[in-house]
Amino acid sequence: MPLVSVLMSSYNHEAYLPIAIESVLNQTFKDFELIILDDASSDHSKEVIRYYSKRDPRIRAYFHKKNRGIARTMNDLLAKANGKYVATFASDDVWAKNKLEKQMAVLKENDNLVVWTEGEVIDKNGNPTGELFTHIHGAAKKKKKSGWILNELLEGNFICSQSVLVKRKNIVRIGYDERLKYVNDYKLMLDLAAKYEFYFIPEPLTQYRIHGRNTIISKRKELRREELIISQYVLEKYGKDMSPKTMSRVYFNMAHAYLTLGNRLESARFTLRGFLLDPISVASLKSIASCVLGERLSAALRSVYHKTKP
């Protein structure tokens, strides 16, 4: 039985599948199985997967007859995993050869850790954009990323979920929320962070691809609606333990989501609630600016400020 089960979800990524699959097969750590589940792709992804699965016995390939969505796909993958640990992986991303080796070295010391790595952002052609995953999440680069990090995550997700390696039984206990289409990985990270310590490897051992077919990028308003669901979940489940500063960030996130959805009244209401909890923060000023000026104008002014800042 393999020590690690690599779980790869696949949907309409025929152009990226070969390099994704090969980046797993070429790992310096060898004791793994690769389980690929295609979620009823309409391109030639199935043919690519079958090609590789016939040539490497470490690959087990499965195919949904109907599109079930990413959360259902990941839960089905978890049910098929045999390894003590599972690593989650998207079919358009890439791993460094020594990713699993470095993570397993950490887990040998404490097998209950959730081990994740920095991600290097690449474009559709595989070229690095010069950005790191944690840096594209604003203040996330300044946050604590190892240890008990629930409070940091409550303010917003900054975990590169495609980089995570975790004990299988720990993630199976929680699972993916199939009601959520776009932010189920964030909810999973929150619930893991409530139960287990995280360990961050700052080396970018995962390449995170941004392209026009990224589900989250192409569905902005739907994403904001689910962010509101997550924010309500956070307030209900973890609100009693939040600091005023953390709760204010949750309110500002909700204000931003409502503004994107065109509901200025609700945006103003949650901006005010956040401001009253943390009136002198930069986040308060940003949220007020967005509410008064509108999201696009506020973002444009912030961009000009950062470009002219010495």
Image: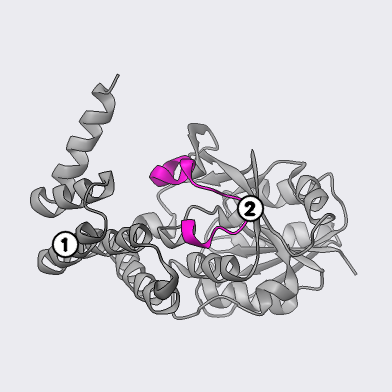
Figure quadrant of the C terminus = top left
The answer to if 273 sits in the magenta stretch is no
| Residue 74 x/y as whole percent | 60, 72
Q: Main secondary structure of the magenta part?
A: helix
Please name which of the two marks, 2 or 1, marks the residue nearer to the observer: 1
Q: Which mark is residue 163?
A: 2
Please name the residue that numbered disc 1 is placed on: 272
| CA neighbours of label 2 inside 10 A, class few (<14), some (14 to 19), many (20+) | many
| Residue 297 x/y as whole percent | 14, 43
Q: CA distance from mark 2 to mark 1?
A: 37 Å
At 33% from the left and 58% from the top, the residue drawn is: 249
At 58% from the left and 54% from the top, the residue drawn is: 14
Give the magenta-colored segment's residue range. Answer: 135-152
Q: In the image, is residue 299 above or below residue 232?
A: above
The answer to if 143 sits in the magenta stretch is yes
Q: Quadrant of residue 9?
A: bottom right
Q: Which mark is residue 123?
A: none
145 relative position to 78: left or right: left
Q: Earlier in the sequence, mark 2 or mark 1?
A: 2
Q: In the image, is residue 54 above or below residue 240?
A: above
Figure quadrant of the N terminus = bottom right
Comparing 45 with 82, the one in front is: 82
Comparing 89 with 104, the one in front is: 104
Amino acid on which disc 1 is placed: Leu
At 79% from the left and 59% from the top, the residue drawn is: 110
Comparing 239 with 30, the one in front is: 239
Amino acid on which disc 2 is placed: Ser
Most extreme residue toward the top is 310
304 relative position to 50: left or right: left
Q: Quadrant of residue 51?
A: bottom right
